[in-house]
Amino acid sequence: MIRMIIVAMVLVSFSFSQDCDSGYSEINGLCFHEGDLMVLQKFIDNSYSTGYTEANCEEGDPYCGSPNPYMDQLDAWFWIIIDSTYYQSGTDNGFQNENGIIEPLELGLQEWNDGRLTSIMCGAYIYCQLSGPIPEEISTLTETSVLRFEYNYLSGFVPEAICDLDINNDDYLEFDLTGNKLCPPYPECVGGGNFWYQDTSSCSEIGDINFDLTINIQDIILLISFIIYDVELDYQEFIAADFNLDGSLDVLDVVELVNQILNGN
């Protein structure tokens, strides 16, 4: 929570810059689209929220964590290209600040043009080590033509909004999510291809609304409460609760979920 507050304060302070257009933030004298920065921040926040570092890393390991803490180090090899200029870590123009927190411009290999993110590569051999769900706000990346997060630890359902991006989903050099822990059902635009392998061993089924890997009466009670009280759900909760996959939560979902349990399917 403290980490998210600090990042929010930093982004707010950028918004008062007089040098950048509205909707853009100034960082190191350059302007960046706030929506693009926020999507990168969401990937980072979701990763920290999984607790991967505490659960899986040996104390003192400088490279183990989610996201990879090495990306913040001054000797990291990561770079960003901004309007055809290279910004290399470990140099005077690098964005790494070694403050112990991964920030949006330290995440993987990026390209920006006119303040918009056009490419983000955070996949195999880059070792971003991201975890948690893909942000629902992914559709904000309207200028991004390369989106690669292969072989991380991303989990949960893939937002349908990813299909709104102007990316060739059949070209793994432009788009790749393979080798993660993402769960079906997948959006039509990303469900095919010969590079679409996922480890689904920890995935919950549709209808497992409390994500305990079992569909039972507790899920029915939770679903009914969502409907009666018109609860605002995040994308992951909504997909799990929309049992008949019709895009809405209503009594039909309850009936089919009850039938599923009674029939033991």
Image (cartoon, rainbow, N blue to C red):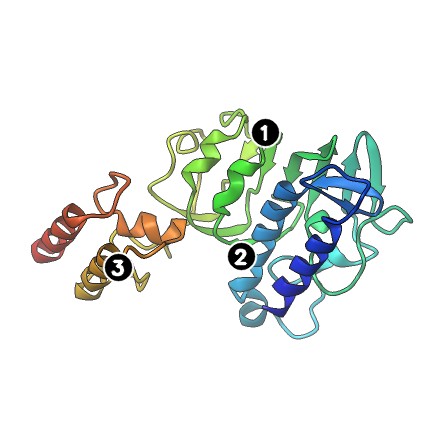
- At a point 75% along the width and 49% down the height, the residue shown is 16
Q: CA distance from mark 2 to mark 3?
A: 27 Å
Residue under pointer 1 = 174
Q: Does any portion of residue 195 appear in the rendered image?
A: no
Q: Residues within 10 Å of mark 2 (few under 14, many from 20)?
A: some
Residue 100 drawn at (x, y percent): 73, 65
Q: Could you say whether the residue bearing mark 1 is in a helix, strand or loop?
A: loop
Residue type pointed to by label 1? Glu
- The reply to whether dot 2 and dot 3 touch (C-beta < 8 Å) is no
Q: CA distance from mark 1 to mark 3?
A: 42 Å
For disc 1, the neighbor class at 10 Å (few under 14, some 14 to 19, many from 20) is some
Which tag is nearer the camera, tag 2 or tag 3?
3
> Mark 3 belongs to which amino acid?
Tyr
| Vertical arrangement, residue 206 with respect to residue 30, above or below | below
Q: Residues within 10 Å of mark 3 (few under 14, many from 20)?
A: few
Q: What residue is shown with label 2?
A: 46
Label whose residue precedes the other's in the sequence (1 or 3): 1
Q: Farthest residue in the right direction?
A: 92
Q: Which residue is mark 3?
A: 229
Of residues 239 and 264, the one nearer the viewer is 239
Q: Which residue is at a point 78% across and 36% down the rendered structure image?
A: 81
Question: Which one is nearer the viewer's eye here, 33 or 112?
Answer: 33
| Sequence-first disc among 2 and 3 | 2
Residue extending farthest bottom: 59
Mark 1 vs mark 2: which is more N-terminal?
A: 2
Q: Quadrant of the N terminus?
A: bottom right
Three-letter code for the amino acid on which mark 2 is drawn = Asn
Look at 21% across and 57% down and name the residue there: 228
Q: Position of residue 18 (x, y in %)?
A: 80, 43
Q: Which mark is residue 165?
A: none
